[in-house]
Image: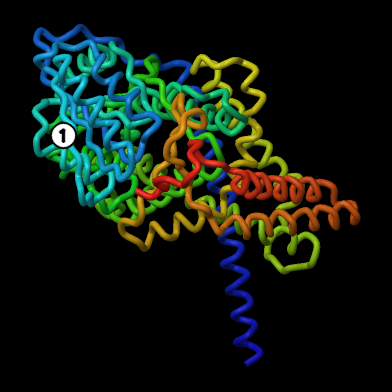
Amino acid sequence: MHTQATGVVWALLVAFEVLRVALRGLLVVLVFHFVRAAWASVWRQPPREPAPPEAWPSVTVQLPLKNEYYVVERVIRAACALDYPAERLDIQVLDDSTDETRERAREVVERARAEGTRIEHIHRSAPRGFKAGALNNGLETARGEFLAMFDADCVPPPDFLRRVIPHFAAPEVGCVQVRWGFLNRHHSLLTRLQAIVLDGLFVVDQHARASSRLPLQFNGTNGVWRRKAIDEAGGWSADILAEDADLSFRAYLAGYRVLHVSDYAVPTEIPEDMAAFRAQQRRWALGSAQMLRTLGLRILTADVPVRAKLMMFMHLGRHAIDPLILLACITSPFTTLYDMPFLVDYGTFWNAGLVGLVLLSSLLFYGRAVTRGGSRPSEALLVPLILPLAMGMSLLYTLAFFRGIVERGGSFVRTPKAGSEGGKRRGPRYLAPRDPLVIAELLLAVAHAYFAFVAAQKGIYAYALFFGLTAGSFGWVGLATLGSRGVGSGTREGARAEG
């Protein structure tokens, strides 16, 4: 019996060590990716703007929305103002709203139609399949050879189609994605950090992938699809909450590619409070894990370059690091302060060195994003705050990742958008769902504050600093979520953020 117990202990110790090594290995991969992408963004230029086609093709603009009272009029008017041959353009307002948004959208559409715009308001009384279902429903009557898509919080400039459509001259281009600008970038510290992270995605990461002809995703809005590519890839799937990335990778496996235009941006709104931000991030993390489960074997056996497979797996499994980060946060106090056994002591020097490399590479990556994205250079000073934000979100990311591995579909929780009227004009009040994980995050914050105090008393100052950082990270995310006030100033609670 004693031998058997000893064997179990050794097995647990080996498993624990494998996870510790995996975390360090993934951090090294992350450092390499940051450096490589930043380097590519310096030396590889965006695609040149091609000459306009001899004849402009037909385009259908799709505006999927649900309960977007404060932004619906703005996006419809922006779509109607697109500078494109009127006889080659039609607009679909794909409205699944259950509140006053429906009537507001209908009124705007009727006025636009009276002014001569080819536009229709398509309302599903019993919507199924969330955003993917709305887009598939619109495809049934869409007349365009190309489909431009904008979420309700976007404001496409008038020249959008004339800038994007010429890039489809090559038949293998299935989608053209432009980067996002941010209407509310300076609203708060949280929106500034989100903008820096998304600039890293659009200005650095996706530019590096596209310039290397590696697969990248359509980001759900501010892009144009070739209708043929959608059909040959199998259409939109409601079983995956990241329906945009799912279609992008299936289109790549079908022989198409997503072309990225990093020097042109569409103004877009980002979540303004922590509750809305975490609802968005949970959906994205869950959706990417669902794709890993459903597309993993197909990618592995596909006749595509090995580096393309690696890039797709890096994208789909990017949240696999979060359970390891969470494990390190939970176990480090016990291995450091309370003699919890482990096999290898990596030492403070090497652990701190690895964290330093992650910080330096993130400064290089996001610093490049700030300068190339046209932001104020001073915003680069905020880059170090991205790491504690990611650490504070690790519990949410971990649960979303494991849930996505085992679950199909799920509830599509939309992100409330304020537009220029949220909080100023009476109307529906949109609230992101309250998250019970906040309790666990605050408990982790309190526990690590205590561990930081104990470590400082023992003179282990490096770990006292780490535990204090961990406490601040979970405390920041948890308390900011509790303080979120949602969108709108109506006295009643209108349509919630469940879609």
Neighbour class for label 1 at 10 Å: few (<14), some, many (≥20)? many
Q: x, y percentage for residue 266?
A: 37, 20
User: Can you name the residue that lies furthest to the bottom here?
Assistant: 1
Q: Is residue 333 visible?
A: yes
Please, is residue 300 above or below residue 186 in the view?
below
User: In this rendering, would 110 be left or right of 47?
Assistant: left
User: In this rendering, would 318 be left or right of 166?
Assistant: right
The residue at the point 30 percent across, 11 percent down is 48
Q: x, y percentage for residue 449?
A: 78, 53
User: In this rendering, would 436 be left or right of 81?
Assistant: right
Between residue 20 and residue 113, name the one nearer to us: 113
User: In this rendering, would 428 be left or right of 471?
Assistant: left
Residue 4, by quadrant, is bottom right
Please, is residue 95 above or below residue 456 in the view?
above
Q: Quadrant of the N terminus?
A: bottom right
* Callout 1 secondary element: helix
Between residue 421 and residue 350, name the one nearer to us: 421
Q: x, y percentage for residue 165?
A: 21, 17
> In the rendered structure, which amino acid carries the disc numbered 1?
Ala
Q: x, y percentage for residue 200?
A: 49, 28
The residue at the point 50 percent across, 16 percent down is 372
The residue at the point 53 percent across, 55 percent down is 435
> How is the structure coloured here?
rainbow
Residue assigned mark 1: 229
Between residue 263 and residue 195, name the one nearer to us: 195
